[in-house]
Amino acid sequence: MEGIPLMGFLALGAVMFLIGAVGVVMKRNPIVIFMCIELMLNAANLTFLSFARYHEFPLIGMISKDATVMNGQMAVVFVMAVAAAEVAIGLGIIMAIFRTKETIDIDEMNILRG
Amino acid sequence: MNSALAQPAPIPWEALLPLIAVATTGVVAMLIEMIWPRRSNDVIVWVCIVGLAAAAGCVVYHWNLPALESFGPRFDNAQGSVGGGLFLHDRFGQIIQLTLIATAFLTVIFSEGYLREKRLAFGEFYPLVMWAAMGGMIMATSRDLLIVFLGLETLSIALYVLAGLSQKDKRSQESALKYFLLGAFASGFMLYGISLIYGATGTTNVAGIPALFSLELPDPTAVNVAYAGMGLILVGFAFKVALVPFHMWTPDVYQGAPTVVTGFMAAASKVAAFAALIRFLDASMAMKDVWIPILTVLAVITMTVGNLIALAQKDAKRILGYSSIAQAGYILVAIVAWAKAKGMPNLTIGYETVAFYLIAYTVMTLGAFAVLSSAASKGKEGTLLEDLYGMWRRAPFPAAMMIVFMASLAGVPPTGGFFGKLFIFFDAVNANLVWLALILAVNSVISVAYYLKIVQATLRDPEVHPTKFAPVNVGLFATCFLCAIGLFAIVLFIDPLKSWLGG
Amino acid sequence: MNPYLPIIILIAIAAVISTVMVVGSWLLGPKKTTPYKSAPFECGVTPLGSARERFPIKFYLTAMLFILFDIEVVFLWSWMAVFKDWVDAGSPMAAYSFWAVMVYMFLWFLGDLYVIRSGALGWEESTTLNPEKLKNTTEFEDETVVMVESQPAKVGI
């Protein structure tokens, strides 16, 4: 293993995940919140890929190395597709809200309460 | 890599047929809507009914197919194959699949009248329900976390759209946005957890977790990563099944979404998520010293908080929302008891209690929301308790059914809800969790208060403006009738369920 | 000792501090925001309009469709990367994967048709296949029933 060690990628992934999670809690614009969620998904993607590329898995005796690598790399492709579907639906919902309410500020979303 | 030598995986068509049938039904329904958008939705409804019946038929026809796990690599250790693969076919999966098909079926037959009354008669509703049901079925028939995640997203994404179905209604839009943002947030947690589990075991299949712990000397770093992954996945599931403190979205979304959607969402997403959760927990038994205490605490606060806040609500849909939170707490008690019993020498509890309660919960929740949906008329819909006043006079049949469903939710004998709670209670007592069983019992008593409030509202005379209830159509009648019958008939399934899933 | 341990500790400390600050201000701080209070301060003048340019909302729809059909290619690309090897080796995977991808492409094609049919690509705003369906419903039948029920007196006159 040359250059950046596995731990570096994992740390970057963890930081991205934390930034995303904190951003979701802090931000008020749903589009920005949604970008933070995308950041969380991409952090998971980075983790998948760095494990697949650099990690010596302890279970290699029970399952083939090819299978482990393939599993991690295909996971990323599926997650990207899911993220794209979520983006489409998210933008659609935000557009619909904008049409009815003329605002998308999260603090204005207060009709539903008990 | 020698990918050129790869062989195609054999496809277990018999086991996959129900999934294919439901998905195809959705596609056909969408095609019909595209070709004749100006027609009424009756054709689509019939197509969906036929497709779902065919799917259920496939499940039943291949009922005795031996359990199998296919697609993808397997684990082989010294003791033999531990399992692995993307698709899992077993008894529990079949039962959950049937439950989800039934949920979609009941939703489809009572929705059309409501959608017309609310001026929402989009043909797109039906394909979305089909695909959501398909997502739930996928969640129930896989042990691969990635596939479970895909199923969860298929279910959730369809539900986000359905929640915002009413384009003119601000409340519907707001509920869609809240559901979407929090749901996607939960997905993020879950996915990161899955990536950590992958890092610890080298596969996204949960079979990797017992394999990791079966090693002579598990790598301590891998074990720690697995614990972290498990925690994050539990957070994701806790959001999806609405456990306190991850429940904030539930009442808002339940209140804002169109009532038929709320009913479907309450039943389908909870059934599918609990099915996937119990499979995941089964595989991570090696880590149960950590998660049993966590789930026990969650169960206690979920039941208590859900029931106490429900007492203060004035909107019937919100009450049912908090009630569904409390019900999730009851199911969690069953799961904790099941996990505790795994370590006990002369006690075996299988999935049967959880499966039984999930089925009963589905039936009574769907029924209750079906009755509530009859309060929609001419584009307006009142869901406050006072909007239900006078229902007894104007729509006697749904009102009577409401009493049955509320009795079942509260746990009054001899309904399915009562037996479900009784089994959970006994399981908990047998697993030396008497205090948890007592908390469950106390909570059931508290819950009677707010279920009675709904019953009382349907029986009261209106004070000012009586709500105009839509005339009861055949679909609503059929749904209420089938749900009520189901609540009593489910008792007959106790013994079969035990023999299929027990121990 | 792992040389990256300090970084992890730093991350953990940063996470704890930021969490404590967020949660602390949320728990302790008073929560009385009025629209007036949260408005930006512009030398005592009421702010006019938004500080940010707004895109016509129409573009979001196009963006959304673009993302969907863009990601479609990801699967084709990963399939394409191995397909030729399979064909060259005469592997049964070639035909198998070809039909699998065809099913997948067929579903995309249907989605594409739906997009065109619902007018999402047109310039005029459209939200449903058939807006009329939302108006002409069973209203007519209901209305007649109500008329007969609620106005029997007129018949008598």
Image (spheres, rainbow, N blue to C red):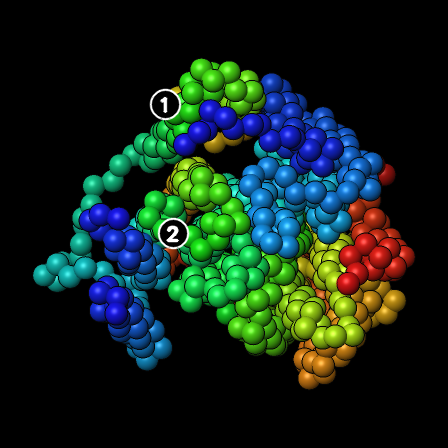
The residue at the point 52 percent across, 64 percent down is B216
Residue B132, percent from left and from top: 60, 42
Say which quarter of the image contains residue C78. top left
SS class, disc 1: loop
Q: Residue C24's x, y, as percent?
A: 31, 77
Q: Nearer the viewer, mark 2 or mark 1?
A: 2
For residue B419, what is the image quadrant? Answer: bottom right
Q: Disc 2 marks which amino acid? A: Glu
Q: Are marks 2 and 1 on the same chain?
A: no
Secondary structure type for disc 2:
loop
Q: Identify residue type, mark 1.
A: Trp
Residue B69 seen: yes
**In x, y percent, where is residue B153?**
52, 45
The residue sitting at 65% across, 31% down in the picture is B11
Describe residue B15's horizontal placement relative to residue A56 as left or right: right
Q: Residue furthest bottom?
A: B435
Q: Is residue B309 left or right of residue B431?
A: left
Question: Could you tell me how far apart the alpha carbons at marks 2 and 1 are, in whole angstroms?
Answer: 54 Å
- In this rendering, the answer to whether B49 lies above or below B418 is above
Q: Position of residue B378 (x, y in %)?
A: 65, 42
Q: Residue furthest front?
A: B78
Q: Residue B333: tell me if it is visible.
A: no
Quarter of the C terminus of chain A within the rendering: bottom right
Choose top left, top right, bottom left or bottom right for residue B358.
Answer: bottom right
Label 2: which residue?
A56
Q: Chain of mark 2?
A: A
Q: Nearer the viewer, residue B369 or A2?
A: A2
Q: Which residue is mark 1?
A: C123
Q: Give the residue displayed 44% in from the left and 15% down from the top.
A: C88
Chain letter, disc 1 residue: C
Dot 1, crowdedness within 10 Å: few (<14), some or many (≥20)? few
Q: Identify the residue at horizontal 72%, vertical 75% (top origin).
A: B344
